[in-house]
Image (tube, rainbow, N blue to C red):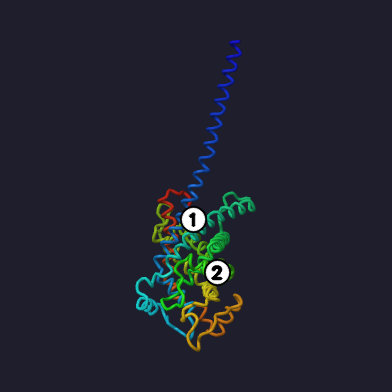
Amino acid sequence: MASEDVKTSESAVSKIVNLAEEAKLAKEEISPSQDKVFSICKSLAAGGIAGGVSRTAVAPLERLKILLQVQNPHNIKYSGTLQGLQYIWKTEGFRGLFKGNGTNCARIVPNSAVKFFSYEQASKGILHLYKQQTGDEDAQLTPLLRLGAGACAGIIAMSATYPMDMVRGRITVQTDKSPYQYRGMFHALSTVLREEGFRALYKGWLPSVIGVVPYVGLNFAVYESLKDWLIKSKAFNLVEDNELGVVTRLACGAAAGTVGQTVAYPLDVIRRRMQMVGWSHAASFVAGDGRSKAPLEYTGMFDAFRKTVRYEGFRALYKGLVPNSVKVVPSIAIAFVTYEQVKVLLGVDIRISD
C-alpha cells in the first residue's frame, strides 16, 4: 500500500514537473514571438515618423509643385518657385503654405510605415529565394534585387493609401476662391465618394503604379548600394566603426531621391492631372476662366499624356520639377536618416541595410 502511495506520489510529481517544463518551453516559444511583434510595431512607427517629419519639412514646396502641375495653361497664377511661394504668402498667408499638409501627414505616416516595413520583408523573402536558387548561403542582395524589393514595397504602400492621396491633391490645390471647400480629409473622401463614385478615389492609380517602380525602387536601390559601396571600399575615409555618419547617409539619400524623382516625374504630373478630372468645384486656375474655361477630361493615362504634350508641349510633363527637386533631396534624405535613427532610439536591431 505504501509502495502504491509512493508510486502515486512519484507519478503526480512527475506530471507536475512535466507540466512545469511544458509551461517553460511554451513561455520560451511565446517570448520571441512577442519580441518580434514589438519589433515590427517599432519598425512601423519609425517608418511613419520618418515620413511625417520629412514631408512637413518641405510642405510649402510640395504644395507649390502640385499647383504648378495642374494649373490651367491659359490662366497662369504660378510661374516659378520663388514667385509661386510669394504669391501663396500674399494671397493665403502663412497657413496657405501648409495647406493640405495635415492630410498629407495623415496619408504619409501609414504609407511610409507600410513602405519601409514591406521593403524589409520583401528584401528578406527575395534574399531567401536567391540563396536557395544559387545555393550560396553567404549571398547578398544585388542592386537589381533591391530594386525589386523597393518596387514591391512602393506599390503595396501606394495602393493601400491611394484614396487619401487623391483627396490630398484636391485639398492642396483648393484656394479661398474655390466655389466649394473640402473641410478636411474625411469630408473630401465622403464627398468624392457620394458625387463621383468609388472609382473616382483611384483616378490616376495606373500612372502611380508605373511610376512607383522607378521612383521607389531606384530610391532604395541607389541608397543601399551607395552605402554598401562606401562601407566595403572605405572610400573617402567616411567609415567609422563599419558605420556611416549622419551627413554621409544624408548625401546617399539625396542622391537616391534625385535619381528616382527625375526618372518618374512625368508620370507624377499625369497622375495629378487625372485626379482633377470630374471635379466640378475646381478653382479657376485649374478649370480656367471665361473663354479658357473647359472641362478637364482624359479617357486614360495615354490620353492624358497625348493631350498634355499636344496642347502644352513636352516641357509640360516637367512642370513643377524645380520645386520638386529642391524638396525631394532633403525630404528623402531626412526620411531615411530619421527612420534609422528612430529605430535605434526605439531599440530595434534591424536596419534597412540588414
| CA distance for labels 1 and 2 | 41 Å
Q: Position of residue 27 (x, y in %)?
A: 52, 36
Query: Does label 1 or label 2 sit earlier along the sequence?
Result: 2
- Of residue 206 and residue 101, the one placed in the foreground of this image is 101
Circle 1 sits on which residue? 352
Q: Is residue 257 visible?
A: yes
Q: Residues within 10 Å of mark 1 (few under 14, many from 20)?
A: some
Circle 2 packing at 10 Å, graded few (<14), some (14-19), many (20+), is few
Residue 271 appears at what percent x and percent y? 54, 73
Rendered position, 149 above or below 276: above
Q: Is there any visible trace of residue 256 in the rendered image?
A: no
Which amino acid lies under the numbered mark 2 shown in the image of this protein? Arg
Q: Quick one: which residue is furthest to the right in this view? A: 133
The numbered disc on residue 194 is 2
- Residue drawn at x 41%, y 80% is 80
Decide which of 226, 186 is in the foreground and name it.
186
The residue furthest bottom is 291
Q: Amino acid at mark 1?
A: Ile
Check the image and report above or below for 106 versus 325. above
Residue drawn 48% across the image and 60% down it: 112
Residue 214 image offset from top left, x and y in percent? 55, 67
Element at label 2:
helix
